[in-house]
Image (cartoon, grey):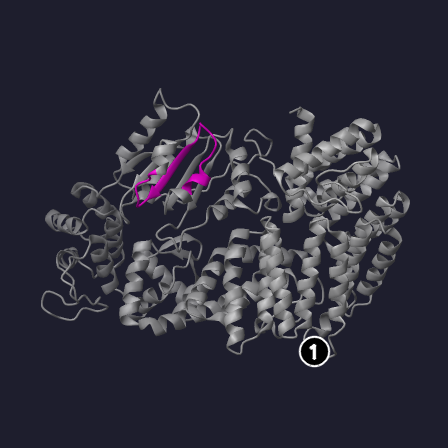
């Protein structure tokens, strides 16, 4: 295949994918629409048509499959050979499309990211020198395969110190890997808690320098981009607590100079057979090393104890590092706890009674005759020493497998104030029953969570545990609804969590950014809260939590989680509707699910969800919801280049809105919703080259936005000015386009909408280019450059700098 044709095929594939997922933002949309225009003209260039191109009486269709993309590219090439002007336009379009492809950031690039994601190493690390020696020997092997990463799997039971060993080895070896260290806790203690590879890939890609807006939505393309990003880097990748090989394989870097450290309780089969992984089993510490670690953790301030007593404590821990650390931490912080007492407690089978038969505080019921494993014995010893209040707090934290335990989560789970929760969290961390992973953010070892949960079931019962889950879910719903309201204050929303919220008098872009960061920080916990609420049958909270995460997913993606949680939201809303709940929620959840499907390029699933939403809202007579669903279907049609159908959808949605009477649900939102639909209709008409109708409709939308109560909607006014500018450009009137884009730039600047300002300035620079005004073009490009710098958008920055270089500016 000739190189030029390959470039065009690649460009068509990139643009078609971006069209569905929305990747590339407004630039991606415009590039898709330019491809539509070029393909529309191929028939008139040679009198024939092909796949993806105009056919008799029908416009082009979006080339979604590889054969369709190849056919469309060939049509462009054939038409370009017949027309030098068309060839110039195709070449310009291919160059424009190249900026949409998710771009790997080479390790040698200026400002390239050198991620350092390792958690802090423990100061009490003991032994395991053989692990470092074995890994070093593998790296130094002369006959090591030259084309593959070195993969080492540290395997062993829970509590054996696999994570600590992997982290310590990574610190020791990181000077040999100058391009950074990636780390992820895969949470693979069970299939239910294990992270999806897509979630980890998105996090890794961003740390490797890929802008969040350029991270693909589907796992396959994320994996391809990850391989591009890692191909020339020398990295350490630590994949901690893997559930199985399938979770690990997509995260292997495509670099022969990299080292992958995997920790797991399970022996890797596929990793060994297909990727040459070397398993390194970890066993218990020797008694001598256990004694050394115990003394190190307990501290020199501890009163001296006979060697035989310390040795008895060490033997009671079984040499399991987690048990040693838990026991040593208890001795370090509890002056009244003597070595002899700990040795006695560890040596006995725990039946809930001490040697003399006295009832022990916080004793764990045990009615079996099975021996208790060393980790559990150590946890029981620490648990017995807790105050009743702290013991109840410990149990409450384990009512669900939260990814991390925040102060908010802990306070609500235990039903205490946040001040008290902070103190109790610190107490549990001091005795090694919790680990602080960030400031005021903690986690259990999964064996610790199992211990606390078993106690919670025995002492508190499922009813109190469910009540704790509901308190956490309500608190997180309150938090998420507040943050979502700050991110997208004007959007239509559903649910009592938003009742009584008042729009701010002025828009604060900085606060919107902070709110989005807050949602992102709690993303995994929010998903866990949804799963917990679903498990306990709190359907009213499940769908409302999904509604409150709309701003997070719309702005940042995370499509695997989006789809997973909203599938639960759909079913929860349906169950509630059958039990006299809010029937409007069904359509709302289906619409949001559809957008998640669009983001991963699943238009058929999106269309099915939207059809279900239209039917559900029709059944319950919810005009506002039905209008939203039909509008969303129109937006899907826009992405698919089905512009006439999109216009029909928007006009139908407008008719549905007009059925809403004063005082009915959605009445206050109708004026803004109608203005948005007028804007959509104008865009659809412009793509059909009905320029007069499009311009009239867009000007009508402008008036509607200005007339909205509360001083209008200046941001959407600016968006309409952008569409007017584009329409004038497509109609061949660059001067009128510039007048409209002047207004757009002014409005975006006033609104503090940095990335949208960059987009407006870039589009206006095109007007100057067409008018042969290089100085004005360069000025607009510099404005865009500054915005992209401020918002850390390297793709946009690279694009405008390339054009500035062409201008010699």
* Residue bearing the label numbered 1: 664
Task: Examine the structure image and report whether residue 249 is included in the region drawn in magenta.
Answer: yes
Q: Secondary structure at mark 1?
A: loop
Residue at the (45%, 62%) spot, across then down: 531
Between residue 302 and residue 43, name the one nearer to us: 43
Q: Position of residue 370 (x, y in %)?
A: 15, 59
Q: Is residue 351 magenta?
A: no
Quadrant position of the C terminus in the picture: top right
Residue stretch rendered in magenta on the structure: 248-269
Residue drawn where x is 53% and y is 79% of the image: 580
Can I make out residue 627 in this image? Answer: yes
Q: Quadrant of the N terminus?
A: top right
Q: Position of residue 796 (x, y in %)?
A: 68, 40
Q: Residue furthest top?
A: 142
Residue at left 84%, top 59%? Answer: 697
Which quarter of the figure has residue 627? bottom right
Q: Is residue 558 left or right of residue 766?
A: left
Quick one: 197 or 795, which is closer to the camera? 197
Whether residue 86 sits left or right of residue 309 in the image: it is: right
Q: Nearer the viewer, residue 193 or 9?
A: 9
Measured from the top left, where is residue 653 in percent x and y? Answer: 73, 65
Where is 66 relative to 414, above or below? above
The residue nearer to you, when weighing 425 against 534, is 534
| Quarter assignment of residue 109 | top right
Position of 42 compared to 187: left or right? right
The quarter of the displayed image where residue 367 is located: bottom left
Q: Please tell me whether residue 134 is drawn above or below residue 29 in the rendered image.
A: above
């Amino acid at each position: 295949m000739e190189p030029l044709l390959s470039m065009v095929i690649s460009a068509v594939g990139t643009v078609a994918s971006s069209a569905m997922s929305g990747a590339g933002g407004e630039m991606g949309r415009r590039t898709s629409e330019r491809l539509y225009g070029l393909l529309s003209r191929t028939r008139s260039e040679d009198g024939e048509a092909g796949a993806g191109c105009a056919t008799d009486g029908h416009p082009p269709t979006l080339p979604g499959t590889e054969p369709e993309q190849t056919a469309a590219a060939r049509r462009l090439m054939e038409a370009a050979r017949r027309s030098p002007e068309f060839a110039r336009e195709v070449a310009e379009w291919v160059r424009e499309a190249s900026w949409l492809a998710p771009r790997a950031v080479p390790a040698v690039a200026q400002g390239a990211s050198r991620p350092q994601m390792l958690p802090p190493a423990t100061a009490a690390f003991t032994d395991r020198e053989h692990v470092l020696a074995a890994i070093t020997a593998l790296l130094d092997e002369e006959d090591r395969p030259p084309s593959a990463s070195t993969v080492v799997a540290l395997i062993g039971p829970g509590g054996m110190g696999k994570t600590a060993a992997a982290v310590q080895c990574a610190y020791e070896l990181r000077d040999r890997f100058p391009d950074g260290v990636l780390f992820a806790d895969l949470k693979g203690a069970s299939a239910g808690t294990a992270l999806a590879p897509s979630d980890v890939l998105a996090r890794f890609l961003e740390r490797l320098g890929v802008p969040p807006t350029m991270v693909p939505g589907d796992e396959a393309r994320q994996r391809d981009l990850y391989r591009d990003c890692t191909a020339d880097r020398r990295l350490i990748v630590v994949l901690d607590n893997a559930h199985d090989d399938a979770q690990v394989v997509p995260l292997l870097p495509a670099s022969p100079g990299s080292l992958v450290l995997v920790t797991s309780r399970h022996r890797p089969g596929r990793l060994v057979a297909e990727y040459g992984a070397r398993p390194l089993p970890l066993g218990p510490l020797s008694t001598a090393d256990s004694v050394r670690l115990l003394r190190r953790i307990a501290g020199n301030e501890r009163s001296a104890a006979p060697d035989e007593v310390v040795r008895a404590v060490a033997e009671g821990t079984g040499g399991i590092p987690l048990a040693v650390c838990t026991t040593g931490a208890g001795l370090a912080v509890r002056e009244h706890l003597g070595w002899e007492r700990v040795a006695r407690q560890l040596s006995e089978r725990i039946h809930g009674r001490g040697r003399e038969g006295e009832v022990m505080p916080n004793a764990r019921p045990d009615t079996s005759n099975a021996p208790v494993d060393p980790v559990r014995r150590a946890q029981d010893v620490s648990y017995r020493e807790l105050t009743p209040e702290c013991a109840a707090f410990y149990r409450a934290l384990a009512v669900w497998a939260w990814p991390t335990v925040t102060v908010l989560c802990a306070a609500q789970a235990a039903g205490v104030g946040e001040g008290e929760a902070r103190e109790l969290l610190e107490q549990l961390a001091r005795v090694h029953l919790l680990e602080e992973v960030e400031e005021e953010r903690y986690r259990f070892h999964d064996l610790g969570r199992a211990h606390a949960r078993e106690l919670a079931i025995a002492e508190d019962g499922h009813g109190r545990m469910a009540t704790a889950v509901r308190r956490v879910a309500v608190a997180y719903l309150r938090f998420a609804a507040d943050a979502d309201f700050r991110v997208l204050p004007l959007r239509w929303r559903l649910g009592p969590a938003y009742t009584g919220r008042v729009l701010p008098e002025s828009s604060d872009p900085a606060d919107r950014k902070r709110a989005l960061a807050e949602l992102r920080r709690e993303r995994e916990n929010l998903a866990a809260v949804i799963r917990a609420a679903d498990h306990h049958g709190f359907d009213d909270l499940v769908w409302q939590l999904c509604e409150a995460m709309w701003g997070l997913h719309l702005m940042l993606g995370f499509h695997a989680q989006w789809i997973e949680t909203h599938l639960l939201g759909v079913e929860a809303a349906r169950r509630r509707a059958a039990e006299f709940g809010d029937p409007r929620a069904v359509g709302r959840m289906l619409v949001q699910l559809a957008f998640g499907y669009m983001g991963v390029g699943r238009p058929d699933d999106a269309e099915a969800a939207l059809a279900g939403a239209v039917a559900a809202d029709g059944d319950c007579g919810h005009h506002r919801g039905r209008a939203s669903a039909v509008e969303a279907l129109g937006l899907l049609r826009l992405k698919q280049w089905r512009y006439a159908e999109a216009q029909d959808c928007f006009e139908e949605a407008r008719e549905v809105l007009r059925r809403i009477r004063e005082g009915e649900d959605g009445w206050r939102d109708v004026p803004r919703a109608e203005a948005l639909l007028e804007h959509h209709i104008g865009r659809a008409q412009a793509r059909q080259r009905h320029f007069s109708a499009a311009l009239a409709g867009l000007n009508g939308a402008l008036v509607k936005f200005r007339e909205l109560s509360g001083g209008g909607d200046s941001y959407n006014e600016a968006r309409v000015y952008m569409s007017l500018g584009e329409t004038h450009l497509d109609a061949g009137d660059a001067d009128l386009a510039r007048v409209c884009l002047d207004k757009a730039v002014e409005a975006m600047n006033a609104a503090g909408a940095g990335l949208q300002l960059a987009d407006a300035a870039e589009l206006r620079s095109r007007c100057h280019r067409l008018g042969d005004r290089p100085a004005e073009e360069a000025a607009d490009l510099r404005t865009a450059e500054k915005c992209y710098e401020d918002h850390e958008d390297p793709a946009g920055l690279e694009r405008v700098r390339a054009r500035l270089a062409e201008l010699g500016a």
